[in-house]
Amino acid sequence: MADPMADQADLATDSLKGRRSRRQRLRERLSSGLSATASGLSATWSRAASEFRRPRTSSGEGEPGDRPEPDRAENVELAPRDSREDPEKKWQKMWESIACEGNDAMSLACERWRRSLAGERNTFWSKLTMKVNDSIHSTDSPRKDWERVSKAVRAGVPESLRCAVWTACSGAMTKKKEALTVLSLDQSDALELSYHFFVKQGLTLKNEASGVIEVDVPRTGCEEALFEPVRRVLLAFAAKNPELGYCQSMNFIAAALLRYCDEESAFWILCSLLEDILPEGYYTRNMVGIRVDMLVLNSLVMRYLPNLHKHLSEHNVDLSPVSMNWFLCLYVNTLPANARDRVLDCLLHEGSKVLFRVALALLRFMEPALLSAHGVAAVYDMLRSPALEDDLVENMYGFWLQGFSTDILIQLRDQHLVFVTSQDAELEARREQRRSRGTSNTLNSDGYKDSQDLGTEGVDVVDIDENSAMDISGSYGVNVCGYEKYKEFIEEGWTTAKKQGLFLGSLDKTATSSEIYDMSNLSLKVIEARSSEIAAVLVNPLQCFHLNQSPPSDPVLSSNNRKVGPTPGYKEWLHRLRDTCKQGGIPLIFDEVYTGFRLHPRGAQGAYDVKADIVCYGKTLGGGLPIGVVCGPTDLMARGDAKKAARVNYVIGTFAGHPFVMASMNAFLKWLELPETIKSYDVMHVNIDNFIKTANAKFQEKDYPIQLTNWFSVWSILYTKPGRYHWLFQYFLKDAGVSLSWVGTGRLLFSLEWKKEDYDRLLERLLSACEQMQKGGWWEEPKANIKAKLGVEIGTAVFKNVLGLTG
């Protein structure tokens, strides 16, 4: 309550100055507004009630012609006064008693509630709204009605009132009025025009946000009827907040709101949530807000669940990978429907503190199971899909969380913000150092880079270079451009599904690698936008030869629709990727374990004239001996952490560092620098090109359905026509004296030692095998679609087996 004596002193001082203060003018405006509100309570609630009960179309919006007339008494729905009435009717009666004070009064009351929860109890705004709220509560509408809202919200808001309550509690009406003012729109002429204005702007967006929205909406998991409303709401928000744009997880929130609200209400509630209710920095590029809150949650777990915190710490389990998704998505894709909606009720009414209450309640509920779990994978599996049996909301507000206040939350956030800010400053200093240093050649004048590291074999060194980048940068994300490798040998937690130009999975310690498409402009934009989160970009240059395709299964071998061969424009795209990484201070890693120096004296970097920051090689560097090598500048190759002496990435194996292996590598690197070596590469490339050209002409002349393609010394065989028995070709090749891997799936390598007569001998044997295939009728092209025919045959066989039929 404001002090009356202080108010009189303020008025006296203002009178002496001969003018009204800003505070006095604000009081007068509020007083006049409240008088008008008091004189028209019935009409105001009639309008509000008619909007709450307005029928909706399939798109979620009400028909304008269905609105009842606001001044007619029969349009005001009064709740019965029976003390035995059901909870929903009690809710209706309570909400009517509050709503009858008018939208302005409701907004002020909700504003006061939110600001007090944000720690603004002693501000002038808080005192003013408190005084206003006291003045509007008369004997007919006691103040306790509003105080009952908190308990009622925690008990669950009825579905019929959910949109109205969410709109009032979230501050959506205030947001809407602010937008009307900014857009200079007349409120009496166009109450809904502001939303449609932003929708119109959003539909014209051609930026990263709009592209990601188009891809994310179908993956939201909601009913198909909500796809378009979700899309429009997200595009409108991106247009209203160009700096924030769109972040994955907003789609889940929008869908949850649209289940109960029309588009316009959902839009303004979303704006209030992301702009006001949640802390700043949740959905920004560096995500400072969410990172701070992850540290806050860890502190709260230590305080309220000490046994669980100790257990997780002993097993090196970090909650952030899972809890970050909880907070960003507001639990809408984690909890069952009923719990999800009730959490949103509380969140919109009480603010972001609810997120911590939910997390603590979930962890407390699962504590017995988590204490018996050993290992990161087991813990994360439980946390991602918690099976709730108890009343989650009841546990959120249980006695065990007594003492968890807004003051504690603010104090913890301030404390951890200092740490996160210093962490970002240190990371930026490292990036700036890398930018100023620029990139270096793979080998220096002596044939080596600044530093090397050894592994047992090629797959080891890929893991080494990823860990090096993450240790040095402090980021957990490694972006993989159209990459193919046997993931089980490299690292757990790979996210390998391919989505055009987008990050997949989360950039955290359990899903450190995210795959994006190469040859995609959107990929470059995503890398640029998320540079602060990316430790490195990993590229396998061989992808240009067989873009984004894993070896197919047998049925696919029957088809001829596979794309094999050099991809046009790949070199230019790789140069652009190099520039994007350099501008963002992101190390570019080349995985040359397979190709090594078979392509060029300087490997893929020489073939493409692109300099990488880190390069890893395999057996090609040690004369076929099991060895893996990582090369890079000293600052990126640091194997230890200066702040944590015990944190060292150490890799060793049977042959790593063996004198025989080291001697072979030394001899090879010295030979690689000789002038005659460079000349031998040129001769090899000429011989290979002539061989490919001659062989393809012979195959076409004799109508054999195969062709050869190559990329420097890497080559492959592909089929030009579909056939059911193409897989037999490898066996005819063996009869002809040529032993190859699965033809049509593998990539083959020519040796630098081969002479022209060796290529001629290979061509003779390829033609001999083709001739034998043709004589046996194995090249015959089927008249029916192979895949369809195989499917019918398999289905028929299974059906007969089920029925016990034979023959």
Image: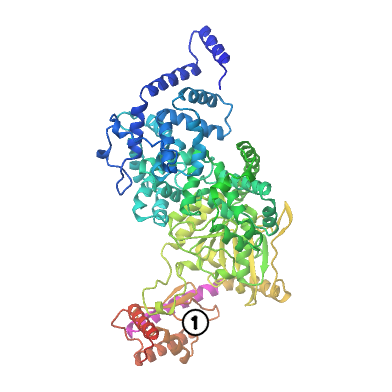
At 53% from the left edge and 32% from the top edge, which residue is drawn?
115
Say which residue label 1 marks.
Answer: 741
Hey, which residue is sitting farthest right in the picture? 645
Which residue occupies 62% across, 47% down? 297
Q: Assess whether residue 572 is covered by the magenta stretch.
A: no
Magenta region includes residue 702: yes
- From what the image shows, is residue 558 above or below residue 170? below
- What kind of colouring is applied to the model shown? rainbow
Residue that appears at 44% across and 19% down: 31
Judge whether residue 475 can be spotted in this image: no
Q: Is the residue marked by circle 1 packed among few (<14), some (14-19), or many (20+) residues within 10 Å?
A: few
Magenta residues span 678-707
User: In this orientation, which residue lies closer to the viewer: 220 or 437?
Assistant: 220
- Which one is nearer the viewer's eye here, 76 or 422? 76
Compared to residue 720, the image places residue 256 above or below, namely above
Q: In this view, does 109 lie above or below 19?
A: below
Query: What percent of the width, then of the height, locates residue 157?
Result: 45, 43
Residue 739: x and y in percent read: 50, 86
Residue 384, given in percent of the width and then of the height, sits at 54, 58
Q: Is residue 411 left or right of residue 761?
A: right
Q: Nearer the viewer, residue 661 or 724?
A: 724
Quadrant for the N terminus, please.
Answer: top right
